[in-house]
Amino acid sequence: MVQSLFRSGFLVRVGHTVLTWVVTLILFLHNTDLRRCEERGELLLPALFFLLVLLSVLLYFTVSLMDPGFVLTDTFKGGQGSDEEMESMIPQPSTPRLRRCGFCLLQQPMRAKHCKTCKHCVRRFDHHCPWIENCVGERNHRWFVVYLLVQLLVLLWALHIALSGVSPGVTWDLWFRANGFLLAALAVVGVFSGVVLLLLGCHLYLVSINCTTWEFMSRHRISYLKNCGGEENPFDRGVFCNLWDFFCICRTVMWEQVYQKNATEVPPELNEF
């Protein structure tokens, strides 16, 4: 029973939610800018902060619970895919041969990887995130980045609010007693701000070059990347197009077709290496 709770991510999600609202409650109860606005009858800023926190929690559960792009059927064997998808997945002479997953025994689409935690292959696999207890893949990656952006705004605003509530004390002992909970909230918010800022920066960079975390870290072991010259990325269409496709195009991409198209555009002498 305990193991199933940990595996399902229940405790992680509950812990994240409780911590979020506890910190929010501390910011509202102490003598911070939020409390002073409430006392003056200026409810706009407190309401906006509360709604932004609520939005971050809703986005967290959206990314955590949605299907990241699990590969549930064998396109060739099960006949579940469209003719166009089946044709585009058939390896061409210049395309690395697709592999069958050694765990779930399904034909892996290009850029997919098996996640041992989720026990499924995931389309355009980026990474398995223990924070959301879910994989980040083709279907939820954009929402993961949006969540990070909203979460960073919440954390930076909370950092400013917490600093506004730190009050002076006659002695160090009295100062710690007066600001103990606020200092704890400040420490939590500060640590998470740094982590989220780093994550958001890394993901925006990788999105801008149409690369995943897995591909970036394991390029030398991936069949369709290890033979590409230098830092060449066969899926990179330029920063603007990469960002547009990532945030605005909501569809399953046949990466075999993209790879084949880019491979045919490479001069013959480069294909020899």
Image (cartoon, helix red, strand yellow):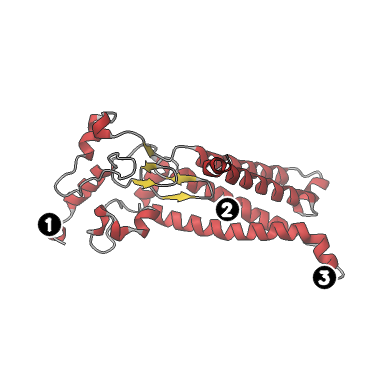
Mark 3, secondary structure of its residue: helix
Q: Residue at x 30, y 39 (%)?
A: 106
Quadrant position of residue 70: top left
Where does label 1 land, which residue?
Answer: 268
* Nearest to the observer: residue 141 or residue 117: 117
Q: Can you tell which of label 3 and label 2 is closer to the viewer?
A: 3
* Nearest to the observer: residue 140 or residue 268: 140
Dot 2 amino acid type: Leu
Between the residue at mark 1 and the residue at mark 3, the CA separation in whole angstroms equals 73 Å
Quadrant position of residue 190: bottom right
Left/right placement of residue 40 relative to residue 143 reads right
Where does label 2 land, which residue?
Answer: 152
Q: Residue at x 76, y 57 (%)?
A: 181
Q: Residue at x 85, y 66 (%)?
A: 174
Dot 2: few (<14), some (14–19), or many (≥20) neighbours within 10 Å? many
Where does label 3 land, which residue?
Answer: 172
Q: Earlier in the sequence, mark 1 or mark 3?
A: 3
Dot 3 amino acid type: Trp
**Picture layout, residue 260 above or below residue 165:** above
Left/right placement of residue 74 relative to residue 214 reads left
Residue 15: mark: none
